[in-house]
Image (cartoon, grey):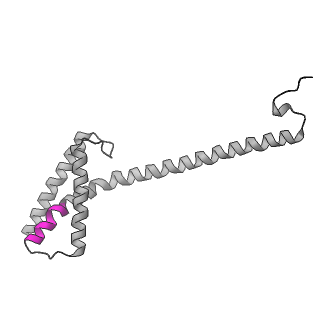
Amino acid sequence: MLRPSNSLLGSSRGARRAHVRAERRKFMGRAVGQGFGLVGDLWGTALDLVLLVSLPVVYLGASYLVLDLPLRFLLRREAPTLLTGTGLVLALIVSLVGLARALQDAEPVAPVRPRFARMMLGLGWFTAVLLTISDLVS
């Protein structure tokens, strides 16, 4: 006599229960995995939005500090402290990263063309020069 190989066709009630439990476990595993994927996508989107909004401002501030702080120290308008020295080093790192990315033609974080991003970075440096001059004149 031939017996069916499918577990649903088995004569055992225990086999049917085991099959239902296994299917339920697979379903829950997929649901949890998709939930983690959704949360990861949401965090990634939030991070992209924060970078999109904050990086232009951070680049502008860093370029200003890189130009302004050393001139203040040289003209003795402000004495160097640990806080201003740390700010200068951090601003220098951010500026160098931005310039290196521009020189390597790296894709910008913002959804713009690389040429536009480089132009905006240049305008940021130009603005920083103007702000530094106006700060030192006053």
From this view, report whether residue 110 is shown above or below residue 67: above
Q: Residue at x 22, y 54 (%)?
A: 96
Residue 68, percent from left and from top: 14, 65
Is 107 located above or below residue 50 in the figure?
Answer: above
Q: Nearer the viewer, residue 122 or 23?
A: 23
Q: Residue at x 6, y 68 (%)?
A: 137
Question: x, y percentage for residue 86?
Answer: 25, 69
Q: Is residue 17 left or right of residue 114?
A: right
Tell me if residue 47 is in the magenta stretch: no
Number of numbered discs present? Answer: 0
Residue occupying image coordinates x 60% and y 46%: 33
Q: Tell whether position 71 is magenta.
A: yes
Prevailing secondary structure of the magenta residues: helix
Determine the residue located farthest toward the front in the rendered image: 1
Q: Residue at x 84, y 39 (%)?
A: 16
To which quarter of the image does residue 135 belong? Answer: bottom left
Which image quarter is the N terminus in? top right
Q: Quadrant of the C terminus?
A: bottom left
In front of the other: 16 or 41: 16
The residue nearer to you, when weighing 16 against 109, is 16
On the image, the x and y values in percent for residue 15 come to 85, 39
- Pinpoint residue 115: horizontal percent, then vertical percent: 22, 40
Image position of 85 (left or right of 42)? left
| 29 up-or-down from 8: above or below | below
**Residue furthest right as drawn:** 1
Instruction: Point out the stretch of residues depicted in magenta.
Output: 64-74
